[in-house]
Structures are given as structure tokens and as C-alpha cells.
Image: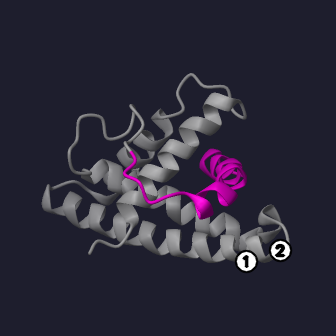
Amino acid sequence: MSRIAALAATLLLASSASALAAPAAKISPPAQVGAGAAVAGTTDKAGCGVLLMVFNEVASRHPQILGRSSNAEMGQAFFRMAGQGGKTLFDQAMAEGAAQGKNPSTVYQTGVASVMAAFNGVRPGGDEFKERGMALTGYCMQMAAPKD
């Protein structure tokens, strides 16, 4: 399993219940993601898009991660919605990148690097890892949420 898929599986477990019950409050990006940006840039959109699409893929291909209950079914629906929002973000990032003269692989690589940077120097599985993962997930979900 790739590093980002392993991250997604860990964050799925940590976030599925709390993400479903989370209030819709404004969430600030983790310090390493979106630092200083009032509006999400191409890099954040690409990174969050990839992350949310991976969440959906992991949840779809490995439903046992969410267990078997009504909450698991809600989790599946939640991550399908996240995946669609992630696809929209990723498509926007690719279009913006093209308009800036960047090739798709550069947009993808800088986006993934931005997301992964949120975990630099943090021990996987520890409390700080989970806290940063939750902050990043909240930031990405807020960015992907439909706008009125």
C-alpha cells in the first residue's frame, strides 16, 4: 500500500465518526498547508483533491475499515461525497495549473507534497499525527464543500 493510501486508511479510521458529527465551523488549514493564503491556491486544491479521492477509494475498496453498522453506511456515503468534492478540487487545480503554464505532473506532485508536509517530523499513529490529520481533513472537506 502506498504511503498516501496508508495515511488515508489511518485518517479514515480516526475521522469517520467525528467527521460525520463535526459542526460546520470554519476550519483553518494546518500550518504546513495553505499557510498565509486567504483563498485556497492551486497547490492546496490539488493536494486536498488527491487526499479526498484516495479516502473514497480506500473506503470503497476496503469497506471493512469502517465496520458493519448504520454508521459505516453513513461513512461510505460521506467518503463518496468527499471523493466527488476531491475530484472537483483536483480538476480545478489542473485547469488553474494549465492556465499558469504548469504541466499536470507538477501540479499533482506539488499538491501531494503540500499535503504530506503537514506530517513532517510526526510519528505515525501518535496523537499529534491524528490531530494534524483531522485538521487537514477538515480543511480539505471545507474547501471541497459546495458553495452557496
Q: Where is residue 56 drawn, in percent x and y?
A: 60, 68
* 3D distance between C-alphas at marks 1 and 2: 7 Å
Dot 1 and dot 2 residues touching (CB under 8 Å): yes
How many residues crowd around disc 2 within 10 Å: few (fewer than 14), some, or many (20 or more)? Answer: few
Q: Would residue 78 be seen by someone viewing this image from the given angle?
A: yes
Disc 1 residue type? Glu
Residue 104 relative to residue 136: left or right: left
Query: Which image quadrant is residue 95 in?
Result: bottom left
Q: Secondary structure at mark 1?
A: helix
Q: Where is residue 114 drawn, in percent x and y?
A: 40, 40
Residue drawn at (48%, 52%) of the image = 138
Residue topped by disc 1: 73
Region in magenta: 1-27
Q: Tell me the tag on residue 69.
A: 2
Residue drawn at (29%, 71%) of the image = 147
Q: Nearer the viewer, residue 27 or 99?
A: 27
Relative vertical location of residue 90 with respect to residue 13 in this rendering, above or below: below
Q: Nearer the viewer, residue 30 or 98?
A: 30
Residue drawn at (22%, 54%) of the image = 102
Relative vertical location of residue 23 with respect to residue 126 in this rendering, above or below: below
Tell me if residue 33 is in the magenta stretch: no
Residue 37 relative to residue 34: left or right: left
Q: Nearer the viewer, residue 39 or 18?
A: 18
Residue 101 relative to residue 47: left or right: left
Tell me if residue 24 is in the magenta stretch: yes
How many residues crowd around disc 1 within 10 Å: few (fewer than 14), some, or many (20 or more)? Answer: some
Q: Where is residue 41 drawn, in percent x and y?
A: 24, 50
Q: Which corner quadrant holds the C terminus?
A: bottom left
Secondary structure, magenta segment, majority class: helix
Residue 21 relative to residue 95: left or right: right
Q: Give the total number of marks visible in the rendering.
A: 2
Relative vertical location of residue 123 with respect to residue 56 in this rendering, above or below: above
